[in-house]
Image (cartoon, helix red, strand yellow):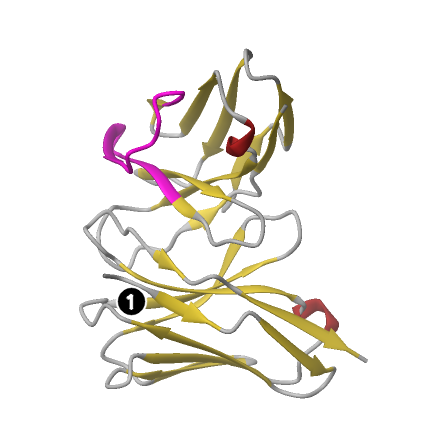
Amino acid sequence: GEDVEQSLFLSVREGDSSVINCTYTDSSSTYLYWYKQEPGAGLQLLTYIFSNMDMKQDQRLTVLLNKKDKHLSLRIADTQTGDSAIYFCAEGPSGGYNKLIFGAGTRLAVHP
Amino acid sequence: DTEVTQTPKHLVMGMTNKKSLKCEQHMGHRAMYWYKQKAKKPPELMFVYSYEKLSINESVPSRFSPECPNSSLLNLHLHALQPEDSALYLCASTNGDGAGEKLFFGSGTQLSVL
């Protein structure tokens, strides 16, 4: 069945790079997404990558996709305290209507 | 306007109450979604409306009743809920219902059932 897995926690020092990893199982996924959720808030789309790409860069964010290994990563350069949040990886669509399968989320803690 | 607005932000209700959650977007999006998110868990899809018609019901109990009065509004009517229904309820929308549509989420309603 469909499954998206992420490590649950990552701690980094301010100014360092953060790398959040994700593995997925559905090889028919056409898009893979990264969402950010701050406490008490909804999910904010950060970036996404089409499945025929292997890299996408957007300012401080770099997404790498290894389709053979079904591995997705999000690199945040120069991590700031404002980046502290939960980051969800999602694959989709599944079954039409843009139904996304979310991972459990990685909590990123940024310390001075 | 790139927002999805949800009201109320917080709701406490008893198991015999009837309440409604509301969601509004003015981006012209044609698909709207309800998700349920338990603490420290990812969002789980409940319902999808596409062009104001219910397209997906993920086997949600009938004590949750969605309604889409028009293309900008989505409601979730709650009746006879259980304490285990306490969660963050998130509304989202997409421009269409095809592949690659980006989900825009509201901030959610934090629901507590006593």
Question: Residue B51, position in %: x, y?
Answer: 24, 33
Q: Chain of mark 1?
A: A
Kind of residue at disc 1: Tyr
Q: Main secondary structure of the magenta part?
A: strand
Q: Is residue B12 magenta?
A: no
Q: Residue furthest right?
A: A112
Question: Residue A102, position in %: x, y?
Answer: 40, 59
Mark 1 is surrounded, within 10 Å at the Cα level, by few (under 14), some (14 to 19) or many (20 or more) other residues, namely: many
Q: Secondary structure at mark 1?
A: strand
Instruction: Specify the quadrant of the image occupied by residue B102.
Output: bottom left
Residue at point 28% right, 34% down? B59
Q: Is residue B52 magenta?
A: yes
User: In this rendering, would B70 be left or right of A86?
Assistant: left
Instruction: Specify the quadrant of the image occupied by residue B49.
Output: top left
Depth order, front residue of A6/A78 = A6
Q: Which residue is mark 1?
A: A31
Q: Quadrant of the C terminus of chain A?
A: bottom right
Q: Reply above or below: B14 against A37.
A: above
The stretch of residues the image draws in magenta is B45-65
